[in-house]
Image (spheres, grey):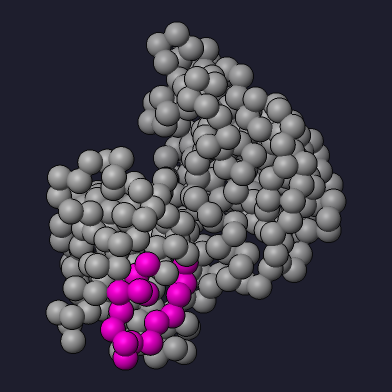
Amino acid sequence: MRILLAFDSFKGCLSAKEVCEAAAAGLLPDDHSFVLPLSDGGEGFAKILTENLGGQMVVAPTQDPLGRCIEAQYGVYGATAVIDVASASGLTLLHPSELDPLRTSSYGTGLLMADAVRRGCREIILGMGGSATNDGGAGMVEALGTLLHDRKIALTACYDTDIRFAEATALYGPQKGVNDQNCDEVLRRMDALEIRYGKERMQLPGTGAAGGIGGAVVYLGGQLLSGADFVLDRLRFEQRICGLGIDLILTGEGCFDRQTLTGKLPLKVALRASVPVYALAGKVMVTSDPHFQEIIAVTPEGTPPDVALRPDFARQQITRQVRLLRQRLA
């Protein structure tokens, strides 16, 4: 059987590539596997897209969300740059005690974008997952000035949540440090930016992604797209299925829940596939859906969260569940 392994990352545990490799280890000896790590704009977006399209990762100086000097990677293929917002403005760059929405800024993301323009890139693609900031993209806009307009740069941002600008603080602000003490001031700043950016335009899906960076992208003349659809389009997903003669697809992400069914990557894979699709996830909150042959939890019930998130444990469980699935289907 010819099987396509098309997984997103298991967030906080395994990269998309590592999940694919663990799944491949569970296939039968006669199976032919094809690995296609994917992202919907979140963790690993730039690297996955760049490597799949034959580009390379480059390193540039920038600033973390608190303005400290760091270096960060982004991808380049041809005249296109692919930048993860999280690489300069991400949650993983800060200790939880450092989260402060009145101080954290997306300025470092703007610096990476400016670096890409100076390298000669004519198109910039942003993956907006994992942001630590709730500044409405104001720092990014400040860092760029008029550079994108002056150089006529095409800008696209990929979201993994389609929230509107005004929803950003209430829905995702708490994980970025919004609390009862600072919430009023954060909302005041976001309201002012919404007026500056244009209230009507801030109703577009995705403008609230990455603490409002999506809204700043629209203000700068860019477009917002579903990250899952964008990646599948760029990687010519349907053509790959046909060209490789795929019989079956395995996909999944860390947690399969109702949010998955609002348009996250596993659902997009299933909607666009012409062959049976099985989903595997570390945690399954929705046990069935007509777009999938089966939705399989890889973590045994009752496993403590700290154990479930151990990479070695997760690999073993993914391999085990794929092996059991293939034995049933053989």
Residue 53 drawn above or below residue 69: below
286 left or right of 221 in image: left
39 left or right of 109 in image: left
Residue at horizontal 35%, vertical 82%? 3
Residue at horizontal 53%, vertical 54%? 44
The answer to whether one can see residue 258 in this image is yes
Q: Quadrant of the N terminus?
A: bottom left
Which residues are the magenta region?
A: 22-37
The answer to whether one can see residue 271 in this image is no
Residue 14 drawn above or below residue 218: below
Q: In the figure, residue 140 lies in which quadrant?
A: top right
Q: In the figure, residue 29 lies in which quadrant?
A: bottom left
Name the residue at the top extreme.
181
Instruction: List x then y, in percent, for residue 144.
Output: 76, 38
Judge whether residue 56 is colored magenta.
no
Residue 289 drawn above or below residue 273: above
Residue at horizontal 28%, vertical 47%? 308
Residue at horizontal 76%, vertical 47%? 60
Instruction: List x then y, in percent, for residue 58.
Output: 74, 56
Instruction: List x then y, in percent, for residue 142.
Output: 74, 31
Instruction: List x then y, in percent, for residue 317.
Output: 27, 61
Residue 293 drawn above or below residue 179: below
Q: Nearer the viewer, residue 226 or 53?
A: 53
Judge whether residue 27 is colored magenta.
yes
Number of marks in the rendered image: 0
Q: Quadrant of the C terminus?
A: bottom left
